Amino acid sequence: TLDGGKTWSKVLFVDDKTGASDLVMDTTNPRILYAAFWQVYRAPWTIESGGPGGGLYRTTDGGDTWKKLTDGLPDVIVGKTTVTVSPKNPSRLWAMIEAEGDKGGLYRSDDGGEKWTNVNNGHAIRQRAWYYYRVFADPASADVVYTTNIRFHKSIDGGKTFSTIRVRHGDTHDLWIDPDNPERLILGDDGGAEISNNGGRSWT
């Protein structure tokens, strides 16, 4: 939309079975956006996550044109995908990508999405991808990244290793980080909302 939501244009479409699972903007350049796509089917008795339409796309012209990003990303069918951009260094991105075997997990790019490396495929951050699988960049440090899953995880080395942050309830799903004070966090989990004012050392 270019008129505050009155009218809309479809700028990126994959197929009838695939939809956008995440959308993030480069905070230093609003014409650069990254979109993640996911083919998923949910029935009362099963969930089918993954399909040929899944993957990551980038636009550098505000959505007029899009490029699918592939270099270093899984060369197999992918499931749920989410993405984040570091506000401190917008050339650095992370993506959580559901894929079979050791091809799933946390991927990082240091050149604006052109090339990617799987930096962590540990079970703790990638289990039950369809239910969790979110990734969040710290606004003050390009080496700090968070992931939500059964537990809440934090990395201070660009995603290579993670520690678990103790919270008041399991099944963590969403996170807001104050852009002016990254010690202030709001975490959404199956127990509701939790707030920390000291970087996750304590919660209310």
Image (cartoon, grey):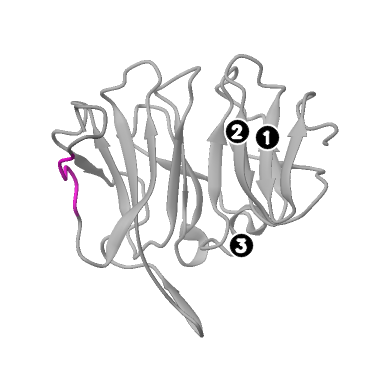
Q: Main secondary structure of the magenta part?
A: loop
Is any atom of residue 178 visible in this view? yes
Q: Nearer the viewer, mark 3 or mark 1?
A: 1
Residue 18 position (above or below residue 92): below
Q: Amino acid at mark 2?
A: Trp
On screen, residue 181 above or below 18: above
**Residue 54 can be seen in this image:** no
Q: Which mark is residue 186?
A: 1
The residue segment tinted magenta is 8-13
Secondary structure beneath dot 3 equals loop
Badge 2 or badge 3: first in the primary sequence: 3
* Disc 1, SS: strand
Which of label 2 and label 3 is nearer to you? 2
Residue 17 is left or right of residue 107, and the answer is left
> Percent position (x, y) of residue 103?
46, 58
Q: Which residue is mark 2?
A: 176
